Each structure stands twice: as C-alpha cells, then as structure tokens.
Image (cartoon, helix red, strand yellow):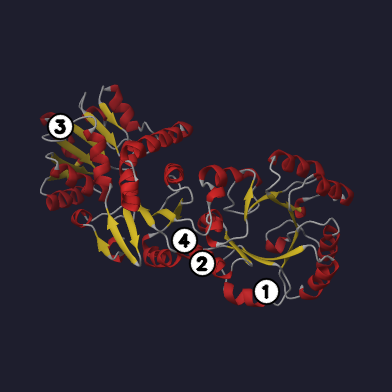
Amino acid sequence: MLCVVIKGTNFKEIFKQIDNLKNEQTLIEIRFDFVDDWDQIAFEKLRKKFPNPMIFTLRTRAQGGEFAGSQVEYVKKIKALAEIKPEYIDIEYSAESSHWIEELHKAHSDIKILLSLHDFEKMPDLPLIYQEMQKNQADLYKFSVMPKSSAEALSLLHFMKINAPKVIAMGMGKYGEVTRVLSPVFGGAFVYCSTSKETQTAPGQVTLTELLNTYNYEYLSPQSNIYALIGDPTDRSISHLSHNTFLHHLERSSVYVKFPVSIMEIPSFLSMAKTVGIKGISVTMPLKEDIIPFLDEIDPFAKKVGAINTIVFQGDRTIGYNTDAKGALDAIDSKISIKGKKMVFIGAGGAVKSVAAEAISRGATVVILNRNQERAVSLAHSMGCNGGGLDQLPKAFETGYDILINATPDPMPIESQWIIPGCVVMDFTTKPKYTTFLTQAKKKNCILVHGYEMFVGQAVGQFRLWFGERVDESQAHQILNKTVLDCLQIEH
C-alpha cells in the first residue's frame, strides 16, 4: 500500500495536503513532530473528516525528526495521539520503550503498533537488531537505513522479503531510492512517499506521482519481474522513463529501475542481483568493458568488440550482449546506406569499438580520432582501420568523409569548421536532443542522427534479448520513440 507522508506546522496545512490527495484508499502518515501549533481537538476533527487509514508519527531529532522534547514528553504526546484512534502509531525503538508500549497496546488494542528504527549513517546489522526489537510487542517493524552501495540496497530488500510481512525496510540517500520503488516486489506492507520533492521527509523519498506514473506501482507485486540499469552515474539516464513505458505495455507487472554501481562494486552487485532474481540488466559507462570478466558467458560479437551493454539472466548464469552497435548503425542506415561510406569517429571508448566493428562489417571505411592519440591508434590497430589524434581532422576534412560521429561526452569536441556541409552527423549523447555538436551541424545542412535514435535502437535490442519473439520491433520503436521524445521536450 502507498503511504503518503504529510507534514505541516498546523492543522490547516495538514488538512489542505490531505484534501488535495483526493484518494480515500491511500494510507496517510501525519508527521506531528513538524507541528508547531498543537491542537488536539482540531486533530480529532481531521481524523473524523478523512476516511483514509492513518499512521500518527512523532519523530525525535535523534532519529531524524523535529521533536526536541524529553522522553517523558514524547510518551505523553504519543498517548494523546492514541486517543484520536489512528490505524497505526509509529513508536521509535529504544531499550526503554518495552514497558509503556505494552501499556499502550492494552489501552488501545485496536491500534497497530509500528516499531521503527532510523540510521542516517549506515546500514547496521539488521538481523541482530530485529531480534532485539522483537522483544517489544509490535505489529510491524520498520527499518529506515542508509545503504552505502547498490549491493547493500538489494540486501536490505532481501532482508525485508525473508521477514515479510512483519518487516518494512527502506533505504535512504543515493542508493536507497530504488528500495522504495521495489518495496511491493519484496513484500513490503507499504512504501512511504511524498506529495512533492519539497515535502520529502527523508533523503531518497520518491514522490507519489513518480511511483504511480513512472513505475506503475499499482501493478507491482511479489510476482513482478525486475530489470535494471547499472553504471556510474545513472541519474541522467531517461531509461527508467522509456523502459517502464514499454514494459507496462508488454508485461504490466514488470519494473525497470536504476542502480548506481561503480567498477569496484560489480562482483557484489551481480551476486546480490542473482540472489534476488533480477531478470535483465542494461549496462552503461564506465562498466561496459570492466564487467566482462564477472559474467559467465559472452556473446561472440560482444566478445569480439570487448564491450557489453546488456545482461540476460538464465538461472544462475549471466550472459553479456552488445546491442549498442546495431542500434547506432540501424539509426544511421535509416538515413543513408553505410556500405562503401567513410566514417570518422571522434572518441575511442567502448561504444566506439563496438559501433566501429559493426560499421566495418557493413562495408564502411572507418577512421578513429581521439584527443588521446595513443588510445585511438591502439583501438584502430586492433580493428584493422586507421586512427590518430584530433590534429588529423583537417586532413580528414580535405580528403572527405560521409559520416561524422561524436562518441565523447563533450558537447562540442571539435571546431565546427571541420564539419563537412551536407554530410551525416551523429552524436551518441541522448539528451539534450540537440547537442552543440548537432546544432552546429544543422547550420551546415547536415543530415542529423540524434543520440536518442541510437538509444531507442539499442533498447529494442535489449527487449528482444529479454522477451524474445514477444517483442514487435516496429511497435517497440514507435512506443519508445514517442516516450523518449516526450522526455526530451520536457528537458528542453
């Protein structure tokens, strides 16, 4: 169940926020520690006004809240809130709480006790703490902690799954956000969300709109399949928007999320991904090459180019593929036939290696130029083509080329004077739709291939690997193109 967190300094603010929800089914947590103007009678009226099930919470500063009173004052106010008869009362776990929690239970047997623990610094030994917490009589046990990696975030979710339905576990911060999205997949009784980014009460808290509109929360359950993007960083990727839209069309209960994963974290993350049953993974920079030694099997083309962007899980086995190359070349081929054309790549990363290899196999002549000349020459030598530094660009301009590709994150890696008017120009960057590089090329009446076209092409390839013949490629292109373009317009 969704639990919308409401915070306000007085009755009117709280009333307005609840009234704006317009949803009688949503569970509501009212954070009374934010209230400056305590009005017991007004809160009783508010409880009677709205039929929503409610959690009453008085969070202390020691556990990330605003209540600064003594323990005696805390207990007194909790007991006053119990008189208003919410469905749940959140009580903070401490060694001294056992005796009065038991008294509260006896006095209000119709109210469920949610015993909570918050750690804003780390993810502590959860099984040990849970064992201690169970000495207190409670209906639910809530853990809100700070995972330090995506592997820890997955282990937090796994802990909740094996202790469901009594345990609610969620992460905070950079690595914790995904745990809130995936909560229903791992048996979470409910997930806390905010009405907006401005009303968040914990770092990493997701908004109600994001859960419903982006992640299709209402369709998620323990039977849902999980797909993910890994890399570092992942925050600028729009794949959670595009992929969830298509997943909702193809397999409603599936979900696609993003995990920040560094090179050092690859082994631990893949291990946990197998444990929790992730079905497929998209791989972005800087992991495309470094992840290969940790996979069980590599597709021949991906092995040849030494870079993967897609992982398929088959039981306990991980298989790596590369759909970047086909996605990029199909996008170019839709504008001009690659066969017999001369292509110049600016950049010498993993994506260049795979796309250049595919281009050569389709009959193109390839030149790789890079700021680091040694890297470009080495990569070109391994592929049987020419390479050099960016100082060779004037020569390439003079001798002519048909296709120019920016495969670097630099929005304008070269002087615009070296762009041949009327040629085909591509930028691997997905957003913005018009990079500086493409904008300059447009001024020269070049044929443009946007990064999002490659993005859509490689995504369709991933879906075919994950779902096989169930994917209609034409339909997939149509849905993904529309979604991505909508996203880019919002960004613009």
The residue carrying mark 2 is 158
The residue carrying mark 4 is 150
Q: How far is the residue under mark 1 from the one under mark 3?
A: 69 Å
Q: Nearer the viewer, mark 4 or mark 2?
A: 2
Q: Do the residues labelled 4 and 1 touch (CB within 8 Å)?
A: no
Q: Where is residue 372 in the image (x, y as percent from the top left)?
A: 23, 48
User: Is 8 situated left or right of 399 in this image?
Assistant: right
Q: Do the residues labelled 4 and 2 touch (CB within 8 Å)?
A: no
Q: How far is the residue under mark 2 from the one under mark 1?
A: 19 Å
The residue carrying mark 1 is 133
User: Is 90 situated left or right of 225 in this image?
Assistant: right
| Quadrant housing residue 416 | top left
The residue carrying mark 3 is 401
Front one among 19 and 25:
25
Q: Nearer the viewer, mark 3 or mark 4?
A: 4
In this orientation, does residue 342 appear?
A: yes
Q: Which of marks 1 and 3 is nearer the N terminus?
A: 1
Q: How far is the residue under mark 4 from the one under mark 1?
A: 26 Å
- Amino acid found under the numbered disc labelled 3: Tyr
- Amino acid found under the numbered disc labelled 4: Ser
